[in-house]
Image (cartoon, coloured by chain):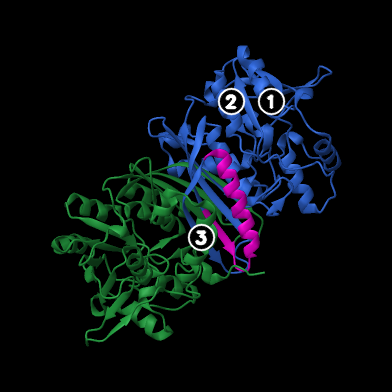
Chain colours: A green, B blue
């Protein structure tokens, strides 16, 4: 019998195929079919999403599983133009977990909820025997109030501008380094943050937001490929405009990773109208100076992503596939 | 350092203490404080809840983890008088899980969603390396539309009547027997069902619904003790009116279990006004002939549950404590 493989959870090709073949087929309905980072429900008023977090180690430079669990779900809501409002949390705890660690994780969650102006309204706690789960998994589900309607990759038009909110790959690089016990530069840390405050500024500025997506599992490459497919456009990226810090670049060169496939937890991609691009960039840079305009849409190669180098060469950037880093989030 | 123990997930004393000490303290807010089976949000219009499912084995007499995951969350909504409407589902899959088993579980979910008239609107799939999780855990979170307002244990009044919707303990007994490889009577199976259709009939009948709660982890004993505490009343139960089938009774006698502490997954407790009790019983019995009026509230021993035997003796029924059956749901 065929088995589920690690690659089925990579946020890339195999992951999407599993979701389409098994879940979409069984659960098919109009809301699910249109669901992107979150589902839009109640006549466009609310967004609803879920995420389970299995990251290892539980604590890492720049965050912990608790901060990640709140950021992850709140960011999915923010990416739909929604203000995070109500969250649920469900803990699956391995017997023997240190109570102090749990308290510290819960404190991180409370801190991050406050940044989002959201509250936990319901929860669930399961404790399972040793060996049934690796230490602690957390699920958060969230409801947000949509403050900007119509955000969808299918609304991306020809010649729209593509921006990234900061340098990419820090979460993936940090988790990998932590797991392998690598001594990295003391400045490398996960990008894990709550994105709603940035999204709020973008909405308030009056710019046209075509699409937003946080580049989690599968990284920037996955988002761009999903958008190219959904919009039926070509996305052309100037490779040298993709911001990557030296520590991440170094790790990628050392280990043969593609920074564009590394996971992020507080970095998002934005598609906007050309006339709004500089205003959008200004807002993004007020939060992180590494924010950058990285490309635009065209009709050259529909449904494909093209990387153009500074030397004039070009190549396709494909949807990531294979076993990327498991338990990254 | 103190550690989390299996007893902290038992649905009883230790579980409640952990939730109060760690989660309620950190996440404190008015909605969470009033949350029972589900939180009431959006000015009383919607109910919102979450549950993670870790049951082992994945398949058991009367259901599987998929059916359980949909019933569990939909039932929590139904218990607040809400019609299940939107669900999210998050799968944590161990590398190597049989794809056919996953498909069969997902098919069970789809079937149960249809019974509730609910849809999956968003999801998440994680695949973790062998040994990081035992086969498959599922989280479902759900939003329901409240069709009967004000259901709360704090609304239970003196002399209200307490009913149970069917015989108790079948889920706990079935899972225990399956796990121990015991050959039980072929008729014993989990009570796992969706409760909304029954709740809908109760609402339509016009009876006063004071409180409803499905007697999952911690069983009937946990629900009655929570209600006694929340209403500051005494709950007096006639022991011989508690419906228990022979197979469950036999297992309890053999192994020293209390049927009142065994988990159920499609059995609920109802508190209603005395004048509505017979009508409520009639409706419950139209779904399961074992439904029964088991007692009433009084002011004899505030916040305590009293079991009265057929011979006139009485004893307190306490909140369950210690290691009950882990991974029952």
**Badge 3 is on which residue?**
B125
The overriding secondary structure of the stretch rendered in magenta is: helix
Residue A8 vertical position relative to residue B41 in the rendered view, above or below: below
In which chain is the residue bearing label 3? B
Q: Secondary structure at mark 3?
A: strand
Residue A297 vertical position relative to residue A139 in the rendered view, above or below: below
Label 1: how many Cα within 10 Å (few below 14, some 14–19, many 20+): few
**Badge 1 is on which residue?**
B286
Q: Is residue A176 visible?
A: yes
First of labels 1, 3 by sequence position: 3
Place of residue B316 in the rendered image (x, y in percent of width and height, measured from the top left) = 72, 26
Q: CA distance from mark 2 to mark 3?
A: 36 Å
Q: CA distance from mark 1 to mark 3?
A: 40 Å
Q: Is B148 in front, or is B108?
A: B108
Q: Is residue B298 visible?
A: no
Q: Secondary structure at mark 2?
A: helix
Q: Which residues fall within the magenta stretch?
A: B90-117
Is there CB contact under 8 Å for labels 1 and 3?
no
Q: CA distance from mark 1 to mark 2?
A: 10 Å
Place of residue B90 in the rendered image (x, y in percent of width and height, measured from the top left) = 52, 54
First of labels 2, 3 by sequence position: 3
Residue B319 vertical position relative to residue A108 in the rendered view, above or below: above
Place of residue B328 in the rendered image (x, y in percent of width and height, measured from the top left) = 68, 47
Q: Secondary structure at mark 1?
A: helix
Are marks 2 and 3 in one subunit?
A: yes
**Badge 2 is on which residue?**
B201
Is there CB contact under 8 Å for labels 1 and 2?
yes
Is there CB contact under 8 Å for labels 2 and 3?
no
């Amino acid at each position: 019998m065929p088995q589920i493989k690690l690659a089925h959870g990579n946020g890339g090709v195999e992951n999407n195929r599993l979701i389409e073949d098994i879940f979409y087929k069984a659960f098919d309905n109009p809301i699910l079919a249109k669901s992107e980072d979150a589902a839009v429900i109640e006549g466009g008023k609310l967004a609803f999403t879920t995420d389970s977090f299995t990251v290892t180690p539980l604590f890492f430079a720049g965050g912990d599983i608790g901060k990640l669990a709140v950021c992850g779900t709140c960011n999915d809501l923010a990416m739909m133009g929604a203000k995070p409002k109500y969250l649920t949390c469900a803990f699956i705890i391995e017997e023997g977990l240190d109570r102090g660690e749990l308290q510290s994780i819960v404190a991180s969650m409370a801190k991050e909820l406050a940044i989002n102006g959201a509250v936990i309204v319901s929860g669930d706690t399961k404790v399972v025997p040793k060996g049934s789960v690796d230490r602690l998994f957390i699920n958060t589900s969230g409801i947000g109030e949509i403050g900007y309607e119509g955000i969808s990759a299918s609304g991306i038009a020809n010649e729209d501008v593509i921006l990234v909110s900061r340098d990419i790959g820090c979460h993936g690089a940090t988790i990998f380094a932590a797991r392998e016990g690598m001594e990295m530069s003391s400045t490398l840390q996960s990008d894990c943050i709550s994105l709603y405050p940035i999204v709020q500024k973008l909405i308030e500025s009056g710019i046209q937001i075509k699409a937003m997506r946080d580049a989690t599992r599968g990284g920037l490459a996955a988002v761009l490929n999903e958008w190219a497919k959904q919009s039926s456009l070509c996305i052309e990226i100037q490779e040298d405009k993709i911001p990557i810090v030296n520590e991440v670049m170094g790790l990628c060169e050392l280990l043969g990773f593609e920074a564009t496939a590394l996971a992020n937890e507080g970095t998002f991609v934005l598609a906007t109208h050309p006339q709004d691009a500089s205003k959008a960039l200004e807002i993004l840079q007020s939060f992180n100076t590494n924010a950058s305009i990285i490309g635009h849409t065209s009709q050259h190669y529909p449904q494909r992503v093209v990387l153009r180098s500074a030397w004039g060469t070009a190549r396709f950037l494909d949807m990531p596939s294979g076993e990327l880093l498991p338990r990254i989030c």
